[in-house]
Amino acid sequence: MGSNEKSSVSSMVNALKLLDLFTMDEPEWTLTDLADELDVGVSTVYRLTNTLMHEGFIVRDPLTKSFRLASSLLELGHYVLTSFDIYEISPPILEKLVQDTGETVHLSILEGNQSIYLQMFECSNYVNVRTHVGKKHPAHCTSTGQVILAYQSEAEIDRVIAQGLPLYSPKSSTITDPILFKERLALIKKQGYTFNKDEMNVGVTAIAAPVKSPSGKVEFAVSIAGLSSRINTNNAPMLIKLVTKAADELSKKLTFGVN
């Protein structure tokens, strides 16, 4: 690979890293902050942002001089979501799960060592979980991430573990020991669901179950999340049945079609 090709690849990587910095929690970035976060020179970020603005991926506020994602990315994001067959068939099943459990429902996919929310259906009950469609969380401390990981190959599980199992927050009950984490995944695969309490957000409990594709591979997971005062050992058996039922229904829809 020539020097020009290496430079182009490096610029592309930096541009993608730059776009990935924009989140719901941090929707705007200044030129200097972008340079600091990417650990590159301001001149490099200046070139990157000019290119991305020209291509319609980001815009710059004329008053604050901060950058944010352009609305044109909505179309791209919508295309990504609708490219999943499950996106079209899941709403009725997930909405019913909200009604039956009274808790917020998520449909997630695994990407690398991150669990990403594809769909979210909120309940009327309060739950202190800052989530939204597209939100990423470490797979090892989320119920959906754990469920999907439990059905992956040993090599894939080892790859995720090798990237680290950090404590989500100082008070979280995140499993950080590789041996204990593998034991948890084995249990999840055996029982067909996970019961996740305080492993990400303290005071929040989640229950998740796997959704299988026609090939039998687990690519998605369905979960409910709510305050631990509402999801507890007393109603857990009933809630687990409802979550696994919804996941099974989605699996059948994917295999046999909508009708």
Image (cartoon, rainbow, N blue to C red):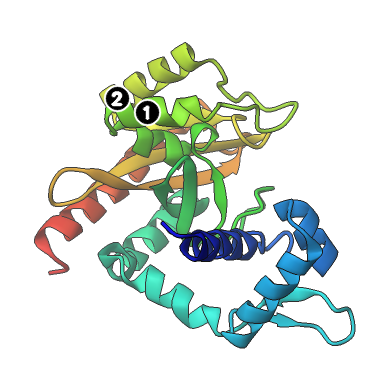
Residue position marked by numbered label 2 in the rendering: 154
Query: Would you identify the image quadrant in which residue 16 lies?
Result: bottom right
Placement of 77 over or under 181, stated as above or below = below
Q: Where the N terminus falls, by quadrant?
A: bottom left
Q: Where the C terminus falls, by quadrant?
A: bottom left
Mark 2 residue element: helix
* Residue located at (30% from left, 50% from top): 246
Q: Position of residue 174 (x, y in %)?
A: 60, 25
Placement of 53 over or under 134, stated as above or below = below
The crowding category of the residue bearing disc 2, from other C-alpha atoms within 10 Å (few below 14, some 14 to 19, many at least 20), is few
Placement of 205 over or under 126, stated as above or below = above
Q: Position of residue 144 (x, y in %)?
A: 43, 41
Q: Position of residue 162 (x, y in %)?
A: 48, 25
Foreground of the two, 199 or 64: 64
List the single residue furthest toward the left: 256
Foreground of the two, 223 or 43: 43
Label 2 to label 1: alpha-carbon separation: 5 Å
Residue position marked by numbered label 1 in the rendering: 157
* Residue located at (30% from left, 48% from top): 219
The crowding category of the residue bearing disc 1, from other C-alpha atoms within 10 Å (few below 14, some 14 to 19, many at least 20), is some
Give, as a three-letter code, the residue at label 1: Ile
Q: Are marks 2 and 1 in contact (CB under 8 Å)?
A: yes
